[in-house]
Image (cartoon, grey):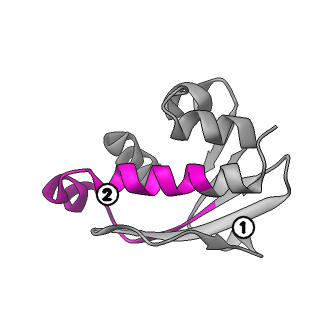
Amino acid sequence: MANEDDCRAALARIAARLAEVDGDRLAEHVVERTISCRITDLGLAYRTRLHAGGLDPFEADGDPESAQVRLTVGSDDLVAMAGEELHPAKAWAAGRVKIEASFLDLLRLRRLL
């Protein structure tokens, strides 16, 4: 099982990868949203804001249910996705990551993955 530091590093890698996406492509598909990531096996939750410029830094979140897009994942799967060992769509299809968002937000996210 990954630890809190591993998860923070994984979230930072995900944010850095998103920052590498072409600005025009990002602006085309991104609408400002709050995003929470709940890490079930560690009892942790983090929040960020997605916008045309990328992701804000992740911060500890006491109320992950109030975010507009909510991810729920185990620590090992989060680290694997950040390391590009596990594709997010495959993880979702296998039930290893849960995504709660509006249908339009899901379509937007899919275009970025």
The numbered mark at residue 65 is 1
Helix, strand or loop status at disc 2: helix
Is residue 64 within the magenta segment? no
- Residue 68 drawn at (x, y percent): 56, 67
Q: Is residue 109 above or below residue 70?
A: above
Question: Which quadrant of the view contains residue 86?
Answer: top right
- Residue 4 drawn at (x, y percent): 76, 56
Q: Is residue 77 above or below residue 94?
A: below
Residue for point 71% across, 73% down:
61
Q: Amino acid at mark 2?
A: Ala
- Residue 71 drawn at (x, y percent): 63, 52
Residue for point 67% across, 42% down:
98
| Residue 111 visible in the picture | yes
Side (left or right) of 96 relative to 13: right
The reply to whether dot 2 and dot 1 touch (C-beta < 8 Å) is: no
Q: Is residue 39 above or below residue 68?
A: above
Whole-number angstrom distance, CA of label 2 to CA of label 1:
25 Å
5 or 76: nearer the eye?
5
Write down the region rendered in magenta.
Answer: 9-36
**Callout 1 crowding tier (Cα within 10 Å): few <14, some 14–19, many ≥20:** some
Q: Which residue is labeled 2 in the image?
A: 19
